[in-house]
Image (tube, rainbow, N blue to C red):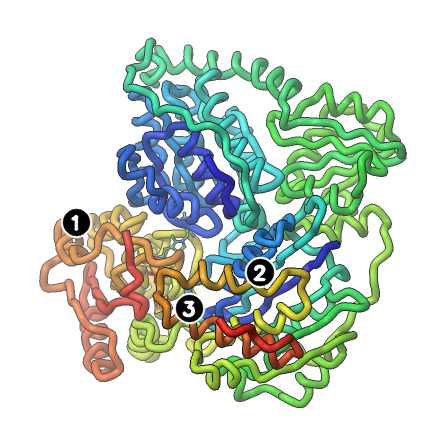
Amino acid sequence: MSNLLLLGNEAVAQGALDAGISGAYAYPGTPSTEIMEHVQRSPESVPRSIHSRWSANEKTALEAALGMSYAGKRALACMKHVGLNVAADIFMNAAVTGTNGGLVVAVADDPSMHSSQNEQDSRIFSAFAQTLTLEPCDVQEAYDMTIAAFALSEALEIPVVLRLTTLLSHSRSVIVRQPEREANQASLPEDATHFMLIPLYARKNWKRLIEKQETFREQSEMSAFNTLLDGPDHSVGIIATGVAYSYARDCLPGTPPAHPILKIGQYPIPEKAIRELAASCETLLVLEDGAPMVEERVKGVLPADRPVVKGRLDGTLPRCGELTPDAIACALGQPTEPMIRPQTLPVRMPRLCKGCPHVESLGFVQEAMATFPDGRVFSDIGCYALGLLPPIELEGTCVNMGSSITMAKGFRDAGLGPSVAVIGDSTFAHSGMTALLDAVFEQTSITVVILDNGTVAMTGWQSSPVAGKIDRICEGLGVDRGQIRTLVPLACNHDSNVVQLREALAYEGVSVIIAQRECVHGEGAKR
Amino acid sequence: MKKDVIVAGVGGQGVLSACRLIADAGLRQGLAVKTVETRGMAQRGGPVCAHVRLSDSVVHSAVIPVGKVDLILAIEPVEGLRYLHALRHKGHLLANVEPFDVLGESLDRDQVMDDLRLAPHCTLLSASSIAREAGSPRSTNVVMLGAAATQLPMDICHFEEALRARFKAKGDAVTASALAAFHAGFGVCGGDEPPIP
Ligand SMILES: Cc1ncc(C[n+]2csc(CCOP(=O)(O)OP(=O)(O)O)c2C)c(N)n1
Ligand code: SF4
């Protein structure tokens, strides 16, 4: 046991290791990636045979984690918020089956969308699945809560969601560790019907999940993560969750703070504690990063008129974007300092690296498509999405992983064309293969350009499970051998690449172009 | 005592590394430390920033509120401007004046320099050149760290230890050139001459 300077994500991983996990399962995605990377780097992972290879996507990751839980061992699944959409089916149903070995799902939300498509709040998803959620306020609590989450999961036989946000995931501080727990020995579920979601048993298990809710609520009222810090001035009472609690303590320093602060770290919300605070306050100010989830629920448990509930819904705090200490200080009516405003502030956008293979690939796609004003390129998520920005400014799309191929198909089904999908190798592995199967099945005339840079570059060069076998996968899915062209995206090949793409565009049916050249940081490709 | 620092620069310049070195030196000094980092973009050339909070009492939030920043350490001049609004009324801006190439061409350099001087206290240095002269062209961030050391409450030995720990795996030559870059930055900003190692 030692004290370590860790990122929030690393603290989650360390907590899971110290809680005695036998496996971690994840697909990378900012801001969650460092959880798995810490497990992979930890010296104890190898001697303890802890599973730590990347999965093809979040769904396969969570399913494997549930399989490990079924075997009686503890498993951690990690993903970013939109990853939980991909894993939604298994997530909702794992709540119904419940767990055998402890199962914790660490989900990192990205308010302000630093590197995401939306700001969805996983606490709402977790409530929808009727599981139990923990939300840490700082790095130490991220560690402690991970350990507590495994204990709760095993005691209540439920997957526990650990909800993180970008800011916490990427905060760093020293943590104090707890004694390590032994991993579980394998043991099969006592009642195997829990995992049989055929109607006969599913109804029984669904009822069991509903009945657990009362226990979850009781646990929340008793939880050491839900605490009231009283303060003298009850004109305003504060309810703060996650990192918002640390901001509130910053704005209201001192012990006791000026106003009472109810910290919420465990969900469902502690209704009794909220009613008690409300009884003595004229106004409640709800501070939370993400959706006004607690704010809405607080309104639901209080009488309509008193106290007044303020937060993100009534405009006291901004409705979207990361919550900041500044917004909280403003909501509390604290004075602000005059700001220095520079005359110039150039916008600086990230760009594709010098020598990036995607620059050439997007270049030949753009040129080949230039003669087709009604044609469209449907692109996907990865480094190459930067091609939508200057200087390339490809007129494409970026919606969710894998959608390039299926959107291209739908566009073609609508009678327009040529229709081109541009997708990275890892995104293809994640959710492009079934999309391609749909197109092959109907022989839809689309061209799929797979950018094979040999790695998951966007999130830090993780290994791609399809590296070196994309052509065989496409052939196996039914693409005509003659319509799978592999080329090298280099400036010297530009003209011949344009010609090859034009040939592919002219083909009636599914054609695939594999643009194969390593990311210039390819040496960094790992695991 | 508390010091709130923003380290700002462009992807690939070593902002996070400078942030961790400050944090490490702070811990060696026995201070409470919290940081928060922008992470996750593999591509080069986007803005990167880190907050470091150092205190001899408890630190609650890792985020520094606007108006509370004591020191901005700008490894790139335009990135220094980006956080000027957050500086405390007596705050200090330490900036490398050599812009990162992507914006370099189109930049009104004189305006940028004038804007940097809006900071209540401002020290400008040619950190990239200093790094080159110190024989360590990729150590602009470490030169800036040396400059920052003149403004931070940690003893020099703690910065040196942090640097040694950081570069240990890369061998003695790399460690020595990092220490040289650090002392070059420290010296330029009026720090005492380095002790003979
Ligand atoms: C469901 C989901 N999971 C994870 C992510 C995060 N993410 C964005 S792009 C990407 C992978 C990109 O890899 P690849 O397609 O190979 O392109 P590259 O970045 O290597 O060019 C990941 C993991 C996401 N946006 N959505
Ligand atoms: S990290 Fe690799 S794939 Fe991403 S922009 Fe840079 S060279 Fe291209």
Q: Distance between the residues labelled 2 and 3?
A: 17 Å
Structural crowding at the residue carrying mark 2, measured as other residues with C-alpha within 10 Å and reported as few (<14), some (14–19) or many (≥20): many
User: Which residue is the site of mark 1?
Assistant: A477
B16 is higher (above) or lower (below) than A54: below
The verdict on label 3 being within 8 Å of ligand 2 is: no
Given residues A132 and A423, the one toward you in this image is: A132
Residue A136, image x and y in percent?
59, 36
Given residues A45 and A118, the one toward you in this image is: A45
Name the image quarter holding residue A87: top left
The numbered dot on residue B175 is 3
Q: Which amino acid does label 2 sit on?
A: Ile
The numbered dot on residue B22 is 2
Structural crowding at the residue carrying mark 3, measured as other residues with C-alpha within 10 Å and reported as few (<14), some (14–19) or many (≥20): some
Q: Which of marks 2 and 3 is in front?
A: 3
Given residues A476 and B75, the one toward you in this image is: B75
- Left or right of B95, for residue A69: left
Q: Do the residues under discs 2 and 1 have CB atoms within 8 angstroms?
A: no
The verdict on label 1 being within 8 Å of ligand 1 is: no
Tell me what residue is drawn at x 18 percent, y 71 percent.
Answer: A487
Q: Distance between the residues labelled 2 and 1?
A: 53 Å
